[in-house]
């Protein structure tokens, strides 16, 4: 985002125009550099799994425990009834902050000791915090590869915006958010990532959130900025819209008197409609491809006051969501160097999703919604929360059953659950592919478990029809291929590449 701040209080320019005014820096409300232990923060866990360990160490606030569970009330032992995540957070209580403000903090996600499978879980910020069940949160995850802007209101989560770009371990970043009345803008490293006009939670304090090893420093809370500002709320950068039309929307703060708002797609500027903090413009008949979308605020004399550009906006493409257990999640992928898609839409550390996206016709994105330990019964409970997070998706890839085979679920029961999952996806207006389950790794073959898997695959074959299609036969492909496994159940990096190739060959 660019903010014009030249001039000396609105004097005349050499060409007779009025120069933009100088805008004062906003007053500081609170700052914390963690030079020593501070009593301003309370440490709270909302996960039911793990133990947090917060401490001020060498001038930073560091958390070194692992906590990971989910929201919901049916089975809180791991994920609960939804796929929303819980962890631990440090909440600012002294002085209390509420109302409108701008909040920023430096965050460094840290590598876990021993490189365990919990590597890459959530880190982020919370703001507008009123209670454990009412707040806004921005979270990033490297393992699944996402950045999410979400709201918890009355205990229920709602996704406000999401992309498929996770963080990079040990790479510092600055995360910031501004609440200005009912308008919210979120930045990462100075770039506006998300924006929203939302009236549910209009005041509250801030918190520092994580599930894994992370450190936080240089907390700064100021009054709202007073210079003109614009942030695109949709379409997001690195997004894919399945239609060949879209409506661009933006949040505008401090619109100058007599000023105007416009949008452009690859440079052709068109006046926006709207008022207050919310502006929009529809674009129809857009050819399939990738574009840049910009929002521009101008002063009354036509000079630019502020702008924001979102790159790699795809139209007429495919938006996939992959669901399942730890195999979909990518456990066992020992090489994290090939898990960013070529177009930058996916940034993650494991799985087949980025490689599949690269193999599909552009523009395409594949979100990783795999959950470790997931069974078909779990997915029945959680599929609606996954679909809620991706209303723009048109296609869903399902691989489920490995964990069911280890607990002796009968084939008929398993088949009924998968049928329910597939029906939920189709009812949401999406096409679904059901993949056949991988065998156990032959060197440690469990014959009884493998029998369950083969019978489950027969059930999967019988569910297809309408908008439910049969995905890759991973059992046939992986059977006996010991070099494609990391352990008895999970593929290695080469195995995940083969999964991407099998999916790509099966999809239209």
Image (cartoon, rainbow, N blue to C red):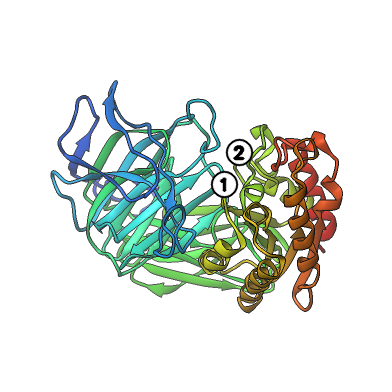
The answer to whether residue 13 is visible is: no
- Does label 2 or label 1 sit earlier along the sequence? 1
At x 59%, y 68%, the residue is 392
Q: Position of residue 456 (x, y in %)?
A: 74, 62
Image side of residue 462 versus residue 61, left or right: right
Helix, strand or loop at label 1? It is loop
Number of marks in the image? 2
Give residue 44's position: percent from left, percent from top.
27, 45
The structure residue drawn at horizontal position 77% and vertical position 79%, both measured from the top left corner, is: 466
Which residue bears the numbered disc 1?
Answer: 145
**Rendering coords of residue 201 (x, y %):** 28, 65
Viewer-proximal residue among 232 and 173: 173
Q: Which residue occupies the foreground of this view, 261 or 422?
A: 422
Label 1 CA crowd tier, 10 Å (few <14, some 14–19, many 20+): many
Q: Which residue lies under the disc numbered 2?
A: 349
Considering the numbered disc 2 on the image, is that residue within a helix, a strand or a loop? loop
Marks 2 and 1, how far apart in space? 7 Å
């Amino acid at each position: 985002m660019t903010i014009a701040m030249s001039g000396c209080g609105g004097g005349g320019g050499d060409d007779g125009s009025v120069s933009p005014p100088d805008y004062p820096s906003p007053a500081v409300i609170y700052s914390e550099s963690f030079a020593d232990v501070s009593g301003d923060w309370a440490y709270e866990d909302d996960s039911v799994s793990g133990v947090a360990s917060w401490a001020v160490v060498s001038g930073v606030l560091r958390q070194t425990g692992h906590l990971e569970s989910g929201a919901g009330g049916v089975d809180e032992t791991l994920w609960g009834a939804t796929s929303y995540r819980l962890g631990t957070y440090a909440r600012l209580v002294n002085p209390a902050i509420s109302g409108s403000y701008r909040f920023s903090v430096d965050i460094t996600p840290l590598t876990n000791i021993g490189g365990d499978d919990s590597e890459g879980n959530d880190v982020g910020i919370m703001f507008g915090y009123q209670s454990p069940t009412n707040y806004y949160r921005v979270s990033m995850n490297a393992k699944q590869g996402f950045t999410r802007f979400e709201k918890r209101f009355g205990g229920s989560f709602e996704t406000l915006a999401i992309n498929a770009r996770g963080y990079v371990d040990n790479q510092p970043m600055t995360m910031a958010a501004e609440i200005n009345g009912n308008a919210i803008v979120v930045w990462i490293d100075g770039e506006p990532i998300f924006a929203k006009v939302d009236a549910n939670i209009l005041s509250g304090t801030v918190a520092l959130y994580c599930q894994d090893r992370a450190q936080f420093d240089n907390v700064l809370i100021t009054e709202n900025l007073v210079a003109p500002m614009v942030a695109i709320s949709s379409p997001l950068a690195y997004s894919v819209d399945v239609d060949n039309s879209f409506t661009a929307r933006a949040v505008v703060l401090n619109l100058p008197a007599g000023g105007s708002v416009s949008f452009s797609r690859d440079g052709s500027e068109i006046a926006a409609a709207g008022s207050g903090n919310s502006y929009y413009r529809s674009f129809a008949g857009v050819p399939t491809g990738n574009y840049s979308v910009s929002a521009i605020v101008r002063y009354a004399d036509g000079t630019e006051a502020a702008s924001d550009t979102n790159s790699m906006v795809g139209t007429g493409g495919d938006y996939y969501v992959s669901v399942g257990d730890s195999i979909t999640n990518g456990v066992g992928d020992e090489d994290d160097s090939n898990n960013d898609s070529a177009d930058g839409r996916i940034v993650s550390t494991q799985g087949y999703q980025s490689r599949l996206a690269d193999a599909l016709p552009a523009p395409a994105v594949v979100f990783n919604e795999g959950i470790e330990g997931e069974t078909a019964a779990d997915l029945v409970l959680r599929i609606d929360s996954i679909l809620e997070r991706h209303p723009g998706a048109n296609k869903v890839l399902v691989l489920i059953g490995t964990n069911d085979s280890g607990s002796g679920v009968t084939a008929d029961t398993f088949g009924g659950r998968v049928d329910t999952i597939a029906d939920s996806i189709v009812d949401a207006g999406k096409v679904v592919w059901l993949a056949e389950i991988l065998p156990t790794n032959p060197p440690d073959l469990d014959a009884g478990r493998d029998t369950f898997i083969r019978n489950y695959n027969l059930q999967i074959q019988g569910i297809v029809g309408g908008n439910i299609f049969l995905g890759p036969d991973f059992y046939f492909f992986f059977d006996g291929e010991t070099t494609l496994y990391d352990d008895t159940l999970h593929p290695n990096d080469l195995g995940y590449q083969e999964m991407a190739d099998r999916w790509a060959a099966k999809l239209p």
